[in-house]
Image: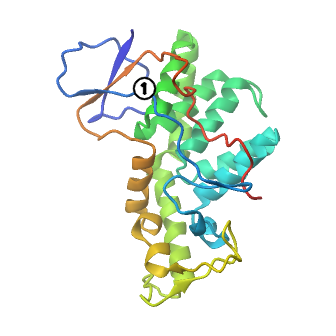
Amino acid sequence: MRSVFLYLALPFLLLPASAPAQDTQPDARVLEQQPPLEREVRGNYIGEPGIPPEMLTSGFLTAHPDIRWRREASYSYNQKDYALAMTQFLRAARYADKPSQAMIAEMYWKGLGVPQDRELGYAWMDLAAERLYPNFVIKREAYWEQLDATQRQDAIKRGQPLLAEYGDDAAKPRLAKVMRQEATRITGSHGGFVSPSLRIVPMTGPLAGTGIDIPAEKYYAPEYWRPQQYFAAQDEVWAAPERQGQVRVGEPEQQATQPPAEGLPEPATPPEH
């Protein structure tokens, strides 16, 4: 089994796999393949992990373009409109959406909607693995093993402008700005203040017209609207390891009892569209 150590105290994005390290590191953690995320389905509407379905109104999705465009892209992908799906995944990717970046990688790797380009596919998967979400790291290493030396050099070179445009340092502030703007616009408060007595009646989304209302403190909870908490909640959903010590990634092993290695957002039925 090949093992690589990614030293989290140093930049790891767009770096090739290193030589095998000793297995005696006391603080090494093995990244293991994660099962598919649970996604609640109501009719033809697919939910988002960790977000109650009543929250997914058009206003909420406008404030969260990462989720909005990933959902649009997933719908297009399932309809086999791969060219449109690529455009939409790219829009989500600009707002720090790692699952969308992983889907772009897969589409380049397989040549879906674009000419097959495995070097670019690796560069995108490396970007998707920036936060060390296990399934994306495992997939990235599987890609790396299938590239020759020349392709690896090309992939690293071509990944640099992607990092500048779509990496967290650029993309997280982009999303944070939209979230803050929409929070102040919807609440009518420059500071995003929400009255404790306010109730939200969903006029769009899966529970529109059902008579349900949502307490304002639930709808505007920090994990949905404050960027730092929002990204922390994403890390929890996607099982990111603690960013300390070392992470050991073993050779991916396909087993019948394990979910597919991709771990990517390909819903079995299209979301509400």
Q: Give x and y (percent) for residue 111.
A: 74, 26
Q: Position of residue 46 (x, y in %)?
A: 66, 53
What residue is shown at x 23% (from left), y 12% (from top)? 22
Q: Nearer the viewer, residue 177 or 234?
A: 234
- The residue tagged 1 is 15
Where the N terminus falls, by quadrant?
top left
**Callout 1 crowding tier (Cα within 10 Å): few <14, some 14–19, many ≥20:** some
Residue positioned 72% across, 53% down in the render: 271
Quarter of the image where the C terminus is located = bottom right
- State left or right for residue 2 relative to residue 106: left
Q: Amino acid at mark 1?
A: Leu
Q: Could you tell me which residue is drawn at 34 percent across and 12 percent down? A: 19
Q: Is residue 53 left or right of residue 45?
A: left
Residue 237 placed where, x, y %?
44, 48
Residue 54 shows in the view? yes
Identify whether 168 is placed above or below 26: below
* Vertical relation: 208 (above or below) 81: below
Q: Quadrant of residue 121?
A: top right
Q: Secondary structure at mark 1?
A: loop
Q: Is residue 148 above or below residue 162?
A: above
In this rendering, would 150 be left or right of 88? Answer: left
